[in-house]
Amino acid sequence: MKDFFKSKIWLSVVLLNTLIFMGMLGYRYISDFKWLDALYMSVITVTTVGYGEITPLGPAGRIFTMFLLLASLFIIGFSLRAITEELLANNTLLQLRKKKLTKIIRRMEKQVIICGYGRNGAQVAAKLQSFHMPFVVIDKNESVAQRIGKDIVFIQGDANDDDVLLTAGIERAGYLIAALPDDASNLYLVLSARQLNPKLVIISRASDPSACKKLTLAGADQVVLPERIGGDHMASLVADPDLITFMDRLGMGGKEKTNLVEISLDTMIDERGASTLRDLNLRHKTGCTVIGYISESGQYIINPEADQLLDPKGKIIVLGRSEQIDALHQVFSF
């Protein structure tokens, strides 16, 4: 507080109030205005509002007004410069942005933290946006801060810095995507993230196949090799073009395109007392087809039978058109 009274902003406040006071005295004794009228004239003159004279001014009053206007322009210019310098010197704008960012992140639960906004990270962010999932992007590159969308929660910093991860709310996050440029950085990130949140689901990118085992040992739940996936996909387009094209359409939006979704069974079973897929009767109620089942123990069953017993914490993979998926959400309210 003591520093404020020594700052140029405080000096600007003093000068502005002094000028208004001097203007009031001038109009009171030069133009013989009442005190309230003199104060009013002084304020509208100093602030350059200029509503007009209350009563016509004489030559002395007009000369005084001209000098008062010139003085007010000088002081207002000085004040604006002082405020700008103070904001830049104390990084006030940056601090305000950080406070706003912190409030947004504190409201998030089970968010995805994307570390690295290169080609892979940007693609992940775009896909998560289409699913309306909350996420935070971390990247230390200044150019990213300039080109990233304003609707994306972005933190400029080193993802290998624990403080940056904590700012992103890693202790409340559900997932972390390690998409840094090199395997060594991703390995260090996975180690740090696993320590900060043991329950976090970590998905890491890898460039070298030999790094997969190391990343898994460090704590990554899944390791993805983008180059291998891309190569496999292109080869599959040669071998089975129609099948792969159909598979590419799964999970995409649009009324004429199919949708593939993963649904937890806890609310479905608890609310309706269902114990088998036949009890859920999804095909009749929504038009959707169950093409996969994941048990609580992690067992994957493709095209399960109607009498498949359901675990409360299991999941089903459902296939359907956009309107059928919407009907599924409406019927089961999730």
Image: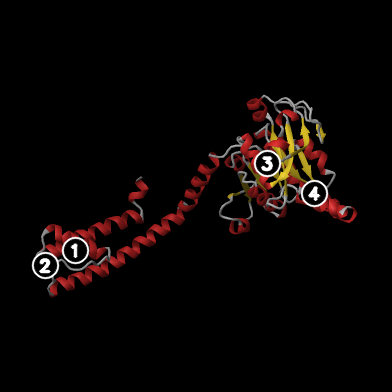
Q: Earlier in the sequence, mark 4 or mark 2?
A: 2
Q: What amino acid is found at the position of numbered circle 2 in the picture?
A: Ser
Q: Earlier in the sequence, mark 2 or mark 3?
A: 2
Image height of 26 relative to 294, above or below? below
The picture places residue 283, in percent across and down from the top left corner, at: 73, 37
Residue at 14% over, 64% down = 27
Which residue is under mark 3? Answer: 176
For residue 247, which numbered disc appears in the image? Answer: 4
Q: What amino acid is found at the position of numbered circle 3 in the picture?
A: Leu
Q: Earlier in the sequence, mark 3 or mark 1?
A: 1
Q: Residue furthest right?
A: 239
Q: CA distance from mark 4 to mark 2?
A: 86 Å
Q: CA distance from mark 2 to mark 1?
A: 11 Å
The picture places residue 5, in percent across and down from the top left corner, at: 33, 50
Q: Earlier in the sequence, mark 2 or mark 1?
A: 2
Which is nearer the eye, 61 or 127?
A: 127
Which residue is under mark 1? Answer: 41
Q: What amino acid is found at the position of numbered circle 1 in the picture?
A: Met
Which mark's residue is nearer the viewer, 4 or 1? 4
